[in-house]
Image (cartoon, helix red, strand yellow):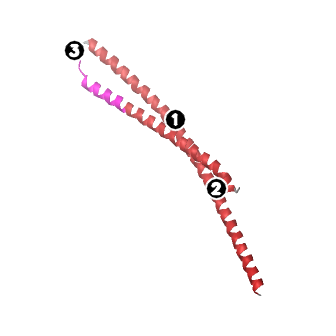
Amino acid sequence: MNRSKRLQPIADIAAHREQEASKRMAAARANLDKHRAMLTDLERYHEEYAQSHNSFADAVRLQDFRLFMDRLEHAIAQQRRLIVTLEREFDTQQDDWRDRRSQRKALDMAADRFAREERRIAEQDEQRQIEEIAALLRTRAI
């Protein structure tokens, strides 16, 4: 079995691993995007709520408003921390995908190089056989 065919199963495994890494990266991106959208919604709600509730008739309503705003601000801070974590996770998945893509490309290049070399050797063998046959025909014609 020639080298290019022996290398093919390894290249196939590398391609599969690259695809799996790509799926993990896409899932991490989707999760990050989802949580960024949630943060945007929380921030918009916070701003709208703060603007719409700027005057209060009594201290109890003011206290309730402040408690709610504190909880909302806490949720926003928590969401921001989560996004930082998710960004790191996405970066990790992206780095893994890049590594696997690089490995696959290297294996593909090696397989192509082996196949080209095998074709070159086969062409040389064929040319040598043609020349031998031509030489035999010439010697018989004499």
Q: Secondary structure at mark 2?
A: helix
What range is drawn magenta here?
A: 40-56
34 over 14 or under it: above or below: above
Residue pointed to by mark 1? 89
- What mark, if any, has residue 20 been given in the picture? none
Could you tell me which secondary element the residue under label 1 belongs to?
A: helix
Q: Which residue does the numbered mark 3 point to in the structure image?
A: 57
Amino acid type at circle 1 is: Glu
Report, in whole angstroms, how far the alpha carbon at label 3 lies from the one at label 1: 47 Å
Contact between marks 3 and 1 (CB within 8 A): the answer is: no
Tell us which disc is closer to us: 3 or 1: 1
- Residue 108 lies in the magenta stretch: no
User: Looking at the image, which residue is at 75% across and 86% down?
Assistant: 141
Q: Nearer the viewer, mark 2 or mark 3?
A: 2
Tag 2 residue = 111
Q: Position of residue 73 (x, y in %)?
A: 38, 24
Query: Residue pushed farthest left?
Result: 57
* Residue found at x 23% / y 17%: 56
Residues packed near mark 3 inside 10 Å, few (<14), some (14 to 19) or many (20 plus): few
* Residue located at (66% from left, 52% from top): 7
Q: How far apart in space, not on screen, are marks 1 and 2 (Cα)?
A: 33 Å
* Label 2 to label 3: alpha-carbon separation: 78 Å
Q: Quick one: quadrant of the C terminus?
A: bottom right
